[in-house]
Amino acid sequence: MKDTKALIIGAGGFVGSYLINCLRHEFHMEVHATKLNGTTFSHPSARIYDLDILDREAVRKLLDKIRPDYIFHLAAQSSVSAAWKDPMLTIDVNIKGSVNVMDAVRELPYKPRILIIGSGEEYGHIRDGQTPISEETMLRPGNLYAATKACQNMIGSIYAKAYGMEIILVRAFNHVGPGQAPIFVVSDFCKQTAEIEMGLREPLIRVGNLSARRDFTDVRDVVRAYGLLSLKGTAGETYNVGSGTAIKIRQILDLIVGMSSAKIGVEVDPAKIRPVDVPVIEADIIKITKATGWKPVISIEQTIKETLDYWRKR
Ligand code: A2R
């Protein structure tokens, strides 16, 4: 795909670097990427620009300057717990910011393909018999982050139909891997374990709700799905990206502890229990598999081992 230009908006976070690598080296695209103003981020395989998606005019100018063929919109306030603490910022970035991006794309004199990244959290309170969750399942968001992502998805779908835009919508379930911030459960447990091994903390992992079941996919599988969807997804359609198998947080914890030689105890930390929690989230991935042939290939054991090693080296 020589001379094909990709633009990643919000590349300074967890997924960004993996997506840059994937688009450059697997899809052979020329990669441009944005980071939030005032933050530090660089990558050898992409040209980096400053961008705050709340600045409408700046979004418009940058898109007009780069004229990308494919746009990957990752920029978000992506933390469920931070959304409880600052709902207004989450609404601004995840809804208003996304509309700024879609409006800027609409004003271009051609139709790039744009992937809008939402979340499996959008489905929220799943009823008995509704798992695995297909894209047609009614959305009942259980937290503020999920509500903003559901809104982003709805607006994206309306824009695709109303303006004939090449917008492809994604609901990404939990993704994990080396480099993820320790506010997310797998990274948090791995970091605590590495610190215990090094004698930096008492031999006690602090946990939240261990009975919740979540669908985890390695971030490298996730970004490959994004690349394939940008090429093969149908405009206006939503695709789940997940492993297709929910796993108990307790099992994740056991796997991590089992990979450590340290003797580790477990303590429930009330601060880690969220105000509203959803018991099971598991993706139905038939739609993306049919459209693109994608399937995750990296096992949860491999992801955990590499995430643990990542924290051991830090
Ligand atoms: O808040 P920072 O400094 O971590 O920057 C984040 C950036 N971001 C923004 N970019 C432009 N304008 C804004 N107003 C703005 N606010 C935040 O978006 C961060 O660099 C990036 C999102 O990265 P993460 O939070 O690490 O998310 P991750 O794991 O890369 O997930 C990518 C997408 C998000 O839409 C998630 O909600 C979804 O996948 O699951």
Image (cartoon, rainbow, N blue to C red):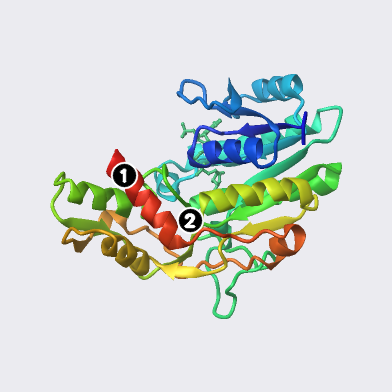
Q: Is residue 273 above or below residue 51?
A: below
Q: Along the line of sight, which residue is nearer the eye, 254 or 159? A: 254
Residue, x 60% and y 50% (percent of image)?
118
253 or 255: nearer the viewer: 255
Q: Is residue 159 visible?
A: no
**Where is residue 285, by image quadrant?**
bottom right
Q: Judge left or right: residue 262 versus residue 97.
A: left
Q: Is residue 35 above or below residue 213?
A: above
User: Where does the image place residue 282, in percent across and percent down from the top left?
Assistant: 54, 68
Q: Amino acid at mark 2?
A: Asn
Residue 293 location, x and y as percent? 72, 60
Q: Which residue is mark 2?
A: 143
Residue 67 appears in the figure: yes
Q: Residues within 10 Å of mark 1 (few under 14, many from 20)?
A: some
The quadrant in which residue 123 appears is bottom right
Q: Nearer the viewer, residue 116 or 276?
A: 116
Q: What's under tag 1, amino acid-wise?
A: Trp
Query: Do callouts 2 and 1 mark residues in contact (Cβ within 8 Å)?
Result: no
Percent coordinates x, y for residue 267 in the rendering: 20, 62
* The C terminus lies in quadrant: top left
Residue at the (45%, 61%) spot, across then down? 300
Q: Which residue is mark 1?
A: 311
Q: Secondary structure at mark 1?
A: helix
Total labels drawn: 2
x, y (%) of residue 58? 65, 20
**What residue sits 67% from the left and 44% below the top?**
116
Q: Count neighbours of disc 2 (C-alpha within 10 A) and say few if under 14, some if 14 to 19, many if 20 or more.
A: many
Q: Secondary structure at mark 2?
A: loop
